[in-house]
Image (cartoon, rainbow, N blue to C red):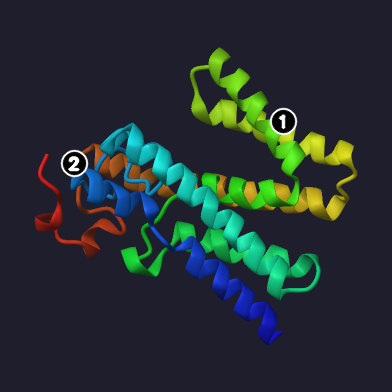
């Protein structure tokens, strides 16, 4: 039990590294929590601080997902170790203690973790995503199509029901976080500071526009 708790904590600490926040601050002196959609993730870093920040965030968030997999594989034993490490990863990315629990959805982190478990399926999913992105304008729809492709390719490769449910659960956590963040995003776009989470940070700390 202690080992499992330690792995979940290790996943949380890795996930809680807010690369989008750190990179946007370093490269553009902007705070992603208060600009764009307020998401501490790749797309908002790109929107707020430019392509370099977005690309670095994507690579590093994916990298911490891969690192979390390595920790679960190296120090754990069996699938449960990986599942708990992944859960901690997503929880840390979505609710980092360092940013007063204001984090991102975790799509890149989840992709980094899953790509280590099923690398061939991940490569095929990337191709499917890129094709879908060229056809549809919605990133979320294209990502959903790529995720569905990943799901079915792993099933074709022999993934069992437990593994398939794990994929649904992990990506589902990102989807739930998106829904939970909608009030914050709407209030941010409306210029309000009264929504949950924003009142904890004084408006004087907002970056200059």
Name the spot of residue 121 as percent of width and height, x first.
75, 37
Horizontal side, residue 120 vs residue 133: left or right = right
Name the spot of residue 126 as percent of width and height, x first.
64, 31
Name the spot of residue 172 as percent of width and height, x first.
62, 48
Label count reads 2
Q: Which residue is mark 1?
A: 124
Within 10 Å of disc 2 (Cα), the crowding (few <14, some 14-19, many 20+) is few
**Nearer-the-camera pick, 51 or 88:** 51
Query: SS of the residue at dot 2?
Result: loop
The quarter of the rendered structure image containing the C terminus is top left
Q: Residue at x 63, y 74 (%)?
A: 7
Q: Is residue 41 above or below residue 197?
A: above
Between disc 2 and disc 1, the foreground one is: 1
Name the spot of residue 109 as percent of width and height, x first.
54, 51
Horizontal side, residue 156 vs residue 140: left or right = right
Q: CA distance from mark 2 to mark 1?
A: 41 Å
Q: Earlier in the sequence, mark 2 or mark 1?
A: 1
Q: Which residue is mark 2?
A: 191
Q: Which mark is residue 109?
A: none
Q: Residue at x 36, y 49 (%)?
A: 20
Q: Residue at x 61, y 20 (%)?
A: 132
**Nearer-the-camera pick, 180 or 19:** 19
The quarter of the rendered structure image containing the N terminus is bottom right
Horizontal side, residue 194 vs residue 98: left or right = left
**Nearer-the-camera pick, 28 or 135:** 28
């Amino acid at each position: 039990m202690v080992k499992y708790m330690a792995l979940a904590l290790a996943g949380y600490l890795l996930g809680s590294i807010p690369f989008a926040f750190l990179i946007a601050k370093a490269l553009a002196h902007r705070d992603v929590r208060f600009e764009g959609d307020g998401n501490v993730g790749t797309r908002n870093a790109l929107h707020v601080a430019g392509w370099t920040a977005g690309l670095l965030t994507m690579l590093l968030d994916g990298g911490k997902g891969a690192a979390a997999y390595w920790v679960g594989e190296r120090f754990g034993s069996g699938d449960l170790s990986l599942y708990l490490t992944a859960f901690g990863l997503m929880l840390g990315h979505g609710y980092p203690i360092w940013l007063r629990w204001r984090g991102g959805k975790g799509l890149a982190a989840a992709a980094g973790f899953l790509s280590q478990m099923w690398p061939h399926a991940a490569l095929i999913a990337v191709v499917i995503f890129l094709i879908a992105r060229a056809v549809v304008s919605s990133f979320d729809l294209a990502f959903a199509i790529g995720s569905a492709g990943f799901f079915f390719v792993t099933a074709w490769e022999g993934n069992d029901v437990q593994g398939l449910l794990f994929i649904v659960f992990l990506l589902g956590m990102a989807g739930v976080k998106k829904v939970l963040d909608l009030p914050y995003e709407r209030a941010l776009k409306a210029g309000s500071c009264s929504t949950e989470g924003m009142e904890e940070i004084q408006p004087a700390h907002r970056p200059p526009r």
